[in-house]
Amino acid sequence: MADQYLTIESPGTGVYKEKGSRFLGFAFPVHDEDSIREHLSSLQKEHHSARHCCYAWRLNPEKTDYRMNDDGEPSGSAGKPIYGQIVSRDLTDLLVVVVRYFGGIKLGVGGLIQAYRTAASEALDQTRIIRRRVFDRLKVEFQYEQMNRVMQVVKEYKLDFEDQHFELECSLIVKSWRRQTPQVLDKFSTISGCTAEIINEKSQY
C-alpha cells in the first residue's frame, strides 16, 4: 500500500485557443466525490453558455478511484486526454476540468485530443505539486503504570494524537506514517501489557 503520494496544493487555471474555440482548463485539489460534484456544479453554472464541460479525476493514494467524462464530445477525445495529464504527472486527489466554448469550426478528433490535453496541461502547470504522507490510525491500550514507556514511543516516532483516555486502563488513538507503522507496532509490543492495532476505516491524509 502507498505510504505517500503526489497531489496539487492549490487550484490552477489555463487557456488554449484553436480555430475560434476556447478551452478553459481548471485543476482543483479534492479528497472525495462530494467536493468533485461541488466544483463541477459551480463551473457548470458559471459557464452555462459553454458547449462542453469535460473532466477527469483520480482519488486516494492507491489511485484506484478515477473517472473520465467527454460531455458530448466524440468518445475518448476529451476525458481521456485530460486524464492522461493526471497520469503523466503521477497525481491523485485532484479534479481537472476543461470547459469548451465552440468557435464554429470543427477540430476533428485529433484536434480535440490536442486541445483538451493542452488545456489540462496548462492548468496543471499553474499548480504546485506536493508530496503528502499516508497515515495509519493506531489504537494503543495499556496500564497506567506503563504511561512513560508508551509516551516515549509516541515521542520517538512523532505520532499525532487523535484521542486519549487515561485512567487505570488507558487508551490512545494516534496517527503513524504508514512507512514506519510496522516498527511502531513492534515497539509497542515490547511494553508489558500494551497492545496496539491498526484501526483504519480508510486511508488517512
Image (spheres, rainbow, N blue to C red):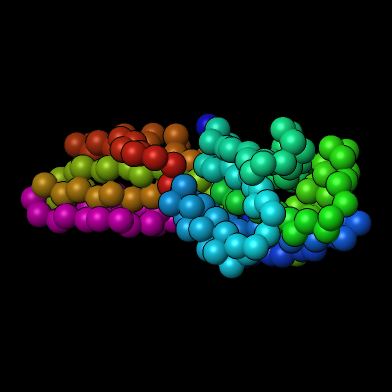
Left or right side of 20 for 152? left
Q: Is residue 15 visible?
A: yes
* Residue 56: quadrant of the picture: top right
Decide whether residue 201 is among the magenta residues: no
Can I make out residue 187 in this image?
no
Q: Residue at x 23, y 39 (%)?
A: 194
User: In the image shown, does 115 or 105 lie closer to the viewer?
Assistant: 105
Q: Name the outermost residue toward the bottom.
A: 46
Tell which residue pokes out farthest to the left in this image. Answer: 168
In which quadrant of the rendered view does residue 19 lie?
A: bottom right
Left or right: residue 45 compared with residue 78: left
User: On screen, 6 above or below 17?
Assistant: above
Residue 105 image position (x, y, % from top left):
88, 52
State the count of labels: 0
Given residues 101 and 160, the one toward you in this image is 101
Q: Nearer the viewer, residue 121 or 198?
A: 121
Whether residue 171 sits left or right of residue 97 in the image: it is left
Q: Position of residue 21 (x, y in %)?
A: 83, 58
Question: Percent position (x, y) of residue 102?
Answer: 78, 56
Residue lying at 59% horizontally and 67% vertically, measured from the top left: 46
Q: Which residues are magenta?
A: 147-168
Check the image and report above or below for 19 versus 146.
below
**Residue 83, quarter of the rendered image:** top right
Residue at (86% x, 47% y) in the render: 106
Magenta segment: does it hold 158?
A: yes
Q: Position of residue 201 (x, y in %)?
A: 34, 39
Residue farthest to the front, as pictured: 104
- Residue shown at 25% from the left, 55% from the top: 163
